[in-house]
Image (tube, coloured by chain):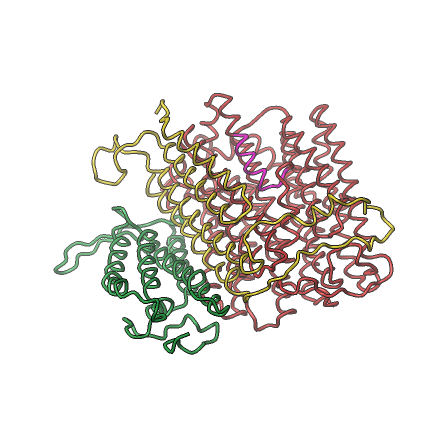
């Protein structure tokens, strides 16, 4: 328990670096890949937290002194379930964005840009500033019906997430 | 069985989580029946409110209630714990959830008719409520993560469902930032487990104390970072004013009322329980100052009423952070009281903003005016929570802020300085809200603008305020007035909660059962 | 669009089953059919379902459980979808996915709640042991019911995924006049 597995530490570090890099991209698909890679990194970290590998923690398979700590595995299982749910959600969101605006890139915040380029403070109390335009995002493609991406896929998330909650209770209680 | 299971009220503890889950399941099955969905949602939330009330009374009377899941006592199994702080916030949160649900249902009926149903709204709404309850009640760091995930996943769906081309970007930002914080949370849990070998909060309290101070500090800061993103503390607040204004009215109100406060609650719980300190926390004092000022100044620059409210939300998170930063019983209890009041008042303001937008057809302050003449009742509905948020006596906001200021002034020179910043931020808040008042309610009445985003679900510019929506908002105003009216007993409860949080022993004894008579 | 394409149905009804259990003639567009995959699917589909049930039942004492069982069953449906398209999937699924999700969640939550009514802590489980004629002693845990709920739920989730990210997108593309 006192030494660190350097190979594992390096792997986790690489996964984190790659994951964060991907997370910083504009395309939602790359963000999704980043989340997946980061998720693998954290799950691996959870496994390392269990200490050096040992016998499988299955009841009745041998010496209980040799088995590895089962709790991080239960935690990682739950985390995997949750990452699974979020991955599908991001897929649906990316598709939805593709249907609505033709690409899946995260755009700049128009309101932020407006305030940044604002020349006159509009904070005075008594004047109207009708010249301030609202730079509404151009909604050229409004194709598709509203059901597929955002609405229907929503239902999945309940499911994808829930076993996380339920299983934790069960698995952890049993494992500990 | 064990000692904790003998608690006569322990059976109540799982219900605030399981009932909404069951409700979500039923509403998914009955997704073709709008009436069923609505009735189930309201009944479940009413029941949870009642249970939360009982939990508050019991935990205030006899100390924390503990329910071990599956009969496995902590630290081996997962325990649900209700102490004064968690029960109080659970009660307030559930009441707000209920009022916002009534508002959302009425909005749906008013806009789309009684017979239409959304397949996802009600299940996701109840799921979010279950996640919030679990976050308040869990006594286990990993279960806290699961609770956050349930809550956040439901919120992802709520913020992006039926989204339009104009608004999908905001949902993407929100989801990405939340995902990042969740993964960091998981990383923090892995590190905590590697260092201590447990994820039970009460058990951790003892084990973290044995860690080298540097390691404990790193773990504490990681948890602060994670919950800081969720609670929107500066400089991790950037996602909030970007995403909340683009959510549909009731959803924005729910998020503004609950989600950040759940993050703050988790912060209070972990910092007080795991990383106790004797004197004010300078780092958090600085962060609190920055949060208050950035939020309040940001609000002044906004022309969009929802963005303005979002910045004020950030600003007032700073007030609560200040209470935690001072780190004594009086300040933490002030922060608890402030959180309870903040949940109601922010949700109310967002609902009122939804009502205003319905009449004016726009969220831009410079495009509206004269509502005082066309909708005087709306003006009253805005004025009361606005004054409450600004902390004008004799409202609940004043009571809570006074508690914070007194605690800050008594805690030393630096907290006193930050207490001065609290006053400055309150004045800026008042100014921002007065600006809204002048723009929206005074001046010549203007005609309602057409809906500039007809693709999304929310219809605006309809120039009418359905009575039930109005009533739901008024109900929340009454709750916030009730907080002011019952300020005495409430302050007493949060005072005891603050003492307990800093003392830690009641919680530890209740969960671990070591020592004491429980 | 080929002649085999069924007539358009209202949106709410499009995932209702319209075909028999093991379909033959009408599948997806003739061009896209692969004989090898369809034949393999016919063999593998029942086997995978049985294996998923095995995983579900042994889950308490051995590797397996509701989640992994549900995923294996879900994969069987994914295979079915890959081979036959949404027509092929619609042939085997007779309930809407949200109903499956909701039922699974209901079963799980009720399993968690029942011990409360009996005075035990929430989520408690008990061992059940029965001696059956010919089979002998069979023991199981009440937490198996929780796993059954999870199993149903996960199957529902996978089906819903296939519906919204699979058939849904295919339908959108068909509507837009693109080839799938």
* Res B125 seen here: no
Q: Colour of chain C?
A: green
Instruction: Supply the letter of whichever chain is red.
Output: B
B483 to B39, vertically: above or below: above
Residue B226 position in % (x across, y down): 54, 37
**What residue is rendered at 61% in x and 53% in y?**
B254
Q: Nearest the camera: B230 or B58? A: B230
**What residue is rendered at 49% in x and 58% in y?**
A154
Query: Can residue B226 be found in the magenta stretch?
Result: yes
Instruction: Supply the letter of whichever chain is yellow.
Output: A
Q: Main secondary structure of the magenta part?
A: helix
Q: Nearest the camera: B209 or B282? A: B282
B35 to A3, vertically: above or below: below
Residue A172 position in % (x across, y down): 37, 42
Image quarter (top left, top right, bottom left or bottom right) of the N terminus of chain C: bottom left
Residue C66 position in % (x across, y down): 33, 53
Left or right: A105 with respect to B188?
Answer: right
Magenta residues (range): B220-233
Q: How many marks?
A: 0
Quarter-of-image position of residue C107: bottom left
**What residue is rendered at 38% in x and 50% in y?**
C123
């Amino acid at each position: 328990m006192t030494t660190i597995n350097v190979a594992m530490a390096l792997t986790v570090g690489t996964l984190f670096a790659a994951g964060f890099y991907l997370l910083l991209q504009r395309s939602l698909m790359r963000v999704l890949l980043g989340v997946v890679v980061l998720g693998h990194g954290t799950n691996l970290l959870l496994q390392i937290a269990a200490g050096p590998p040992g016998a499988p923690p299955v009841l009745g398979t041998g010496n209980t002194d040799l088995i590895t700590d089962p709790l991080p595995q239960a935690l990682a299982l739950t985390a995997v379930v949750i990452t699974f749910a979020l991955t599908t959600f991001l897929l649906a969101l990316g598709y939805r964005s593709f249907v609505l605006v033709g690409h899946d890139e995260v755009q700049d915040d128009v309101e932020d840009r407006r305030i940044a380029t604002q020349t006159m403070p509009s904070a005075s109390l008594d004047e109207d500033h009708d010249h301030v335009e609202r730079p509404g995002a151009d909604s050229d493609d409004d194709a598709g019906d509203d059901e597929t991406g955002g609405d229907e896929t929503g239902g999945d998330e309940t499911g994808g997430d829930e076993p996380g909650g339920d299983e934790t209770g069960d698995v952890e209680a049993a494992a500990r | 069985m064990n000692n904790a299971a003998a608690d006569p009220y322990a059976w109540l503890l799982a219900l605030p989580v399981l009932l909404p889950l069951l409700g979500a399941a039923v509403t998914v099955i009955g997704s073709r029946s709008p009436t069923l969905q609505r009735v189930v949602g309201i009944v479940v939330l009413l029941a949870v409110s009642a249970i939360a009330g009982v939990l508050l009374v019991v935990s205030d009377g006899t100390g924390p209630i503990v329910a071990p899941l599956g009969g496995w006592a902590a630290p081996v199994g997962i325990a649900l714990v209700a102490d004064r702080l968690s029960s109080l916030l659970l009660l307030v949160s559930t009441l707000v959830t209920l009022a916002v649900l009534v508002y959302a249902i009425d909005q749906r009926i008013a806009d789309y008719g009684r017979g239409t149903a959304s397949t996802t709204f009600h299940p996701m709404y109840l799921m979010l409520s279950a996640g919030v309850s679990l976050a308040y009640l869990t006594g286990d760091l990993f279960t806290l993560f699961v609770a956050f995930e349930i809550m956040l996943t439901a919120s992802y769906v709520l913020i992006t469902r039926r989204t339009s081309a104009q608004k999908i970007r905001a949902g993407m930002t929100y989801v990405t930032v939340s995902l990042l914080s969740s993964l960091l949370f998981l990383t923090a849990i892995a590190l905590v487990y590697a260092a201590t070998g447990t994820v039970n909060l009460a058990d951790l309290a003892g084990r973290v104390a044995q860690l080298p101070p540097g390691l404990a500090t790193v773990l504490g800061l990681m948890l602060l970072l994670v919950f800081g993103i969720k609670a929107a503390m500066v400089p991790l607040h950037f996602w909030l004013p970007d995403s909340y204004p683009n959510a549909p009215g009731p959803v924005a109100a729910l998020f503004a009322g609950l989600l950040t406060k759940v993050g703050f609650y988790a912060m209070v719980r972990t910092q007080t329980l795991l990383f106790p300190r004797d004197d004010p926390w300078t780092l958090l004092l600085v962060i609190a100052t920055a949060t208050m000022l950035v939020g309040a100044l940001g609000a002044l620059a906004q022309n969009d009423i929802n963005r303005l409210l979002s910045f004020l939300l950030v600003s007032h998170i700073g007030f609560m952070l200040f209470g935690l930063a001072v780190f004594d019983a009086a300040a933490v209890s002030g922060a608890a009281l402030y959180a309870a009041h903040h949940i109601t008042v922010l949700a109310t303001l967002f609902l009122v903003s939804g009502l205003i937008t319905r009449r004016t057809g726009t969220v831009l302050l410079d495009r509206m005016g004269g509502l005082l003449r066309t909708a005087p009742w709306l003006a009253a509905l805005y004025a009361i929570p606005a004054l409450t948020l600004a902390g004008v006596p004799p409202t609940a906001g004043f009571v809570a802020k006074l508690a914070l200021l007194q605690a800050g002034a008594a805690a030393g020179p630096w907290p006193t300085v930050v207490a001065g910043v609290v006053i400055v931020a309150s004045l800026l808040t008042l100014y921002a809200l007065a600006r809204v008042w002048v723009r929206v309610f005074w001046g010549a009445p203007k005609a309602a603008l057409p809906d500039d985003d007809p693709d999304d679900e929310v219809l605006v510019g309809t120039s009418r305020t359905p009575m039930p929506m109005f009533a739901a908002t008024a109900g929340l105003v009454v709750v916030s007035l009730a907080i002011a009216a019952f300020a005495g007993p409430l302050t007493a409860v949060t005072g005891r909660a603050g003492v307990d949080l800093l003392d830690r022993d009641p919680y530890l004894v209740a969960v671990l059962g070591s020592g004491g008579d429980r | 669009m080929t002649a085999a394409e069924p007539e358009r149905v209202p949106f709410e009804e499009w995932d209702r089953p319209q075909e028999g259990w093991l379909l033959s003639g009408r599948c997806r567009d003739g061009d896209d059919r692969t004989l090898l995959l369809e034949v393999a699917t016919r063999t593998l589909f029942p086997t995978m379902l049985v294996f998923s049930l095995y995983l579900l039942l042994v889950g308490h004492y051995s590797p397996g459980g509701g989640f992994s069982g549900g995923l294996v069953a879900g994969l069987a449906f994914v295979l079915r979808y890959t081979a036959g398209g949404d027509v092929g999937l619609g042939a085997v699924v007779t309930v809407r996915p949200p109903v499956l999700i909701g039922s699974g969640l209901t079963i799980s939550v009720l399993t968690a709640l029942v011990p409360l009514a009996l005075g035990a802590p929430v989520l408690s489980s008990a061992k059940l042991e029965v001696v059956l004629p010919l089979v002998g002693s069979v023991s199981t845990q009440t937490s198996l019911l929780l796993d059954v709920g999870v199993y149903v739920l996960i199957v529902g989730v996978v089906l819903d995924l296939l519906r919204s990210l699979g058939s849904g997108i295919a339908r959108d593309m068909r509507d837009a006049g693109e080839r799938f």
